[in-house]
Image (spheres, rainbow, N blue to C red):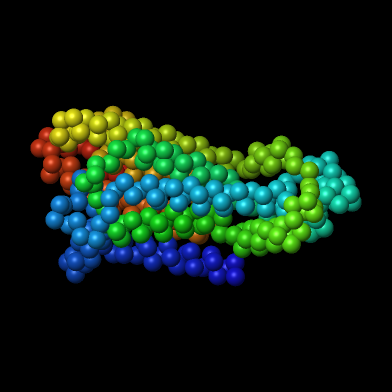
Amino acid sequence: MEMGLVGLLRAAWVAAILPLLLASLPLPGLGRLHEAVMGFARRGNIMQSSSCKFTVPQRFFTHLYALAVLWTGLLLAATWLYAYEMAPIASEPFLYSSITSHLTGGLHLFTLHRTRSTPLKHRYMVWKSVFLLLLMEIQVLRRLYENIYVFKHSPSARMHIFAYLTGLFFYTAAPLSLSSNFAVEVYEFSANLVSEFIVRGKDQMASSEFDLWEFVNPLMKLGWRNWIGAIIFFWGWIRQHRCHRILGSLRECREESGEYVIPYGDWFERVSCPRYLAEMVIYAGLVVASGGSDLTIWLLFGFVVANLVFAAEETHRWYHIKFDHYPWDRFAIIPLIY
């Protein structure tokens, strides 16, 4: 079942990537595919007023980020509790305290068995999933905040309903991909806890002593690759927030003057779509933080790159059409390359 989930996620990412790659090929026979995919990708100022069929308000992005916060938070909480109970990375004193807790009825026998028998590498991988989900939750929380308080979407701003559905897919599958190797174990663990709670009630539940330090300390013991990945993640995270602040301020100016203006500052000096570039850096950080050995996370990153590079092409073209004096030394999304 676990391999079934991993295989399903990988197949879903491949199915999402292939149309973007095919539509990006400069072949005459793929022109209609390119236009169809581009029609789905257009939103906001690059969506023509005549293409408002099958669209939803762009402010519906709030739904996507609210879903992402709730879903990622649920996965994070369940995986963190599973890691704490079933995959401790503990010092010997803590292991002895676990044995004592078991002898006094405070810890389930299965927990003690897993503490002894689960390989240390497996436990580190579980905590690595917790780490990745924690970073993802930090990302989607910021995006939800920005969508409510930084971006002031115009009532007339629209996006294709297919783009909305793609967003629902992405923010459901992305957090799951970060923890897919243990998702089935976490589900079974959580289901057992809920069943035990229903059958026995709160007062009859076996209680284990909660140690906040042991709840957090395993994250401190992760490897240098994980923390380098986190540094890359937060570099992109900060840059994206700055770019969103710039765009948010421009939208306020547009409400006053009624005119679009060219964005300047930060990565806007180098590319037309710096927030997309920052998003790619964020997910590259997640790949590095994962250790770089999980194909599912690589496919997630591949979709992010393919999707954003494709969308950046149209945005870059719109800027050059809209503004006669648009800086010609700006690239679309990757400095000096594209």
User: Residue 162, can we see it?
Assistant: yes
**Along the viewing direction, whichever of 173 and 330 lies nearer the viewer:** 173
Residue at image point 55% right, 44% down: 134
**Along the viewing direction, whichever of 211 and 220 lies nearer the viewer:** 211
Residue at image point 41% right, 38% down: 145
**Along the viewing direction, whichever of 153 and 187 lies nearer the viewer:** 153
Residue at image point 68% right, 55% down: 122
Query: Position of 312 compared to 92: left or right?
Result: left
Which x, y percent locates residue 160? 26, 57
For this orientation, the residue located farthest to the left is 324
Which x, y percent locates residue 142? 44, 39
Residue at image point 45% right, 51% down: 67
User: Residue 291, can we see it?
Assistant: no
Which x, y percent locates residue 333? 29, 44
Query: Image height check: is 63 above or below 240?
Result: below
Residue 281, picture quadrant: top left
Query: Position of 75 compared to 144: left or right?
Result: right
Which x, y percent locates residue 138? 50, 41
Residue 170, picture quadrant: bottom left
Query: Position of 198 compared to 240: left or right?
Result: right
Q: Is the N terminus in the top left, top right, bottom left or bottom right quadrant?
A: bottom right
